[in-house]
Amino acid sequence: MSQGTSTETTTLAGGCFWCLEAVFRELNGVEAVISGYTGGTTANPTYQKVCNDQTGHAEAVQVTFDPARISYRDILEVFFSVHDPTTLNRQGEDIGTQYRSAIFYHNEQQRAIAAEVIKELTQAHVWKVPIVTQVVPLDKFYPAEDYHQEYFARHPEQGYCRMVISPKVDKLRKQWAKRMKR
């Protein structure tokens, strides 16, 4: 936590949590990112059960940030720039409900801002097809197993990291250069 400031937390799902975690760790003002599961019906889900679509959970990240350094709106704008919010239950080759696009809001202000950002992106015709991102209240977030945390940082040479995550991080660094940690 920053000296003398309070933090906020948001929970986002947009495909593989390794991708989102790697992206959000790069942003100035983001203080912590935890990969995990939310939006399902099973208490204490495991990766195996989530991947086998036995829990209804999405792979998600919980992002803790300093709103004096990065706004919730900025977090959402980055979120929408690094995944495809128009594909239902899919991100690239990752297919299943665990890969859905969703914003799990923590309070009414987050819900309103998420709805506003989606409306603006829709009106701007950023994508040719409708945004299918769910905007739903956060119920319970379960941190993923330890081996999923900081996956990209620990395994940058792994095939999925090189082929899928690295391009997203590179895109982020170019598109959001002013927002990057130094």
Image (tube, rainbow, N blue to C red):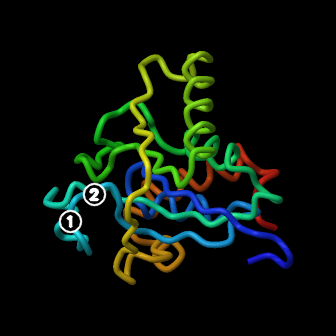
- Name which residue type carries label 1: Thr
Residue in the image at 36% along x and 74% along y: 144
| Residue 51 occupies quadrant | bottom left
Crowd rating for badge 2 (residues with CA inside 10 Å; few <14, some 14–19, many 20+): many
Q: CA distance from mark 1 to mark 2?
A: 8 Å
**Image quadrant for the C terminus?**
bottom right
Between 52 and 3, the one lying in front of the other is 3
User: Would residue 96 be found to the left or right of residue 159 on screen?
Assistant: left
Q: Residue 168 placed where, x, y %?
A: 54, 51
Q: Residue 155 placed where, x, y %?
A: 46, 76
Residue in the image at 53% along x and 55% along y: 106
Q: Residue furthest front?
A: 108
The mark tally for this picture is: 2
Residue in the image at 64% along x and 41% along y: 77
Callout 1 secondary element: loop
Q: Residue 108 placed where, x, y %?
A: 57, 45
Figure check: 33 above or below 98 = below
- Which residue lies under the disc numbered 2? 57
What's the mark number on residue 42? 1
Between 4 and 80, the one lying in front of the other is 4
Figure check: 110 above or below 9 = above
Q: Are marks 1 and 2 in contact (CB under 8 Å)?
A: yes
Callout 2 secondary element: loop
Crowd rating for badge 1 (residues with CA inside 10 Å; few <14, some 14–19, many 20+): some
- Name which residue type carries label 2: His
